[in-house]
Amino acid sequence: DEEKSEGLTGILADCLDNEAAIQQALEDIMRNWKKYADSSKDSSDAVADEVKKLDITEKMHAITQEKIANTKVRKVEKSAEEKKIKEAILLGYGNEGSEGSDDDNDKAGDLGPANTNAESVQKEALENREKQ
């Protein structure tokens, strides 16, 4: 406090000529400074208390649980026509496999040329071992 008073007295002496006016201004400044410091301390304490009261994770959990509880699962019912179409498609796939010949099944299951890379690598490794 003394350092503040001395510094302010020096500044006020440059601005004011009367010693009584300097003392009065110094007292006013110090009084207002303390009042402001106390009020800001109180407000920072109040903010800290509010933050403690606001447990964000707990509130988020409560909100999430509320949303889950309010969410309705809607089951889409297919019309009779859609059910018949699906059944016909499934029956078509089931009958196609039993009616076709072996050649047709081979063509249907043909995925292209077989990948023989792994076999080639194994054969080459065996040949290298035999050479050594």
Image: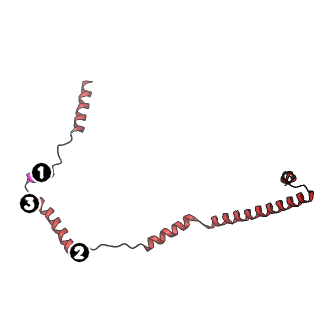
Quadrant assignment for the N terminus: bottom right
State the separation of the CA atoms marked 3 and 1: 14 Å
Circle nearer the N terminus (3, 1)? 3
Point 55% across, 66% down: residue: 58
Q: What is the C-alpha distance between the residues marked 1 and 2?
A: 36 Å
Q: Amino acid at mark 1?
A: Lys
- Mark 1 element type: helix
The boundaries of the magenta stretch are 99-105
Q: Return the residue at label 1.
A: 107
Quarter location, residue 40:
bottom right
Front: mark 2 or 3: 2
User: Which residue sits at x=11%, y=60%?
Assistant: 96
Please, what secondary structure does the residue beneath circle 3 have? helix
- Closer to the eye: label 1 or 2: 2
Picture quarter containing residue 54? bottom right
Which residue: 56% across, 64% down?
Answer: 56
Element carrying mark 2: loop
Q: Mark 1 vs mark 2: which is more N-terminal?
A: 2
Name which quarter of the figure residue 44 lies in: bottom right
- The residue carrying pointer 3 sits among few (fewer than 14), some (14 to 19) or many (20 or more) residues within 10 Å by Cα, namely few
Crowding near pointer 2: few (<14 within 10 Å), some, many (20+)?
few
Q: Is residue 100 magenta?
A: yes
Discs 2, 3 touching: Cβ within 8 Å? no
Tell me if mark 1 has few (under 14), some (14-19) or many (20+) residues whose alpha carbon lies within 10 angstroms of its own. few
Q: Is residue 61 magenta?
A: no
Q: Tell me whether the residue at label 3 lies in contact with that at label 1, contact meaning CB atoms closer than 8 angstroms.
A: no
- Which label sits on residue 79? 2
Q: Nearer the viewer, residue 80 or 23?
A: 23
Q: Which residue is mark 3?
A: 99
Relative to the observer, which residue lies in front, 28 or 13?
13
Q: Residue 89 location, x and y as percent?
A: 16, 65
Q: In the rendering, at what x and y percent does residue 106 appear?
A: 12, 50
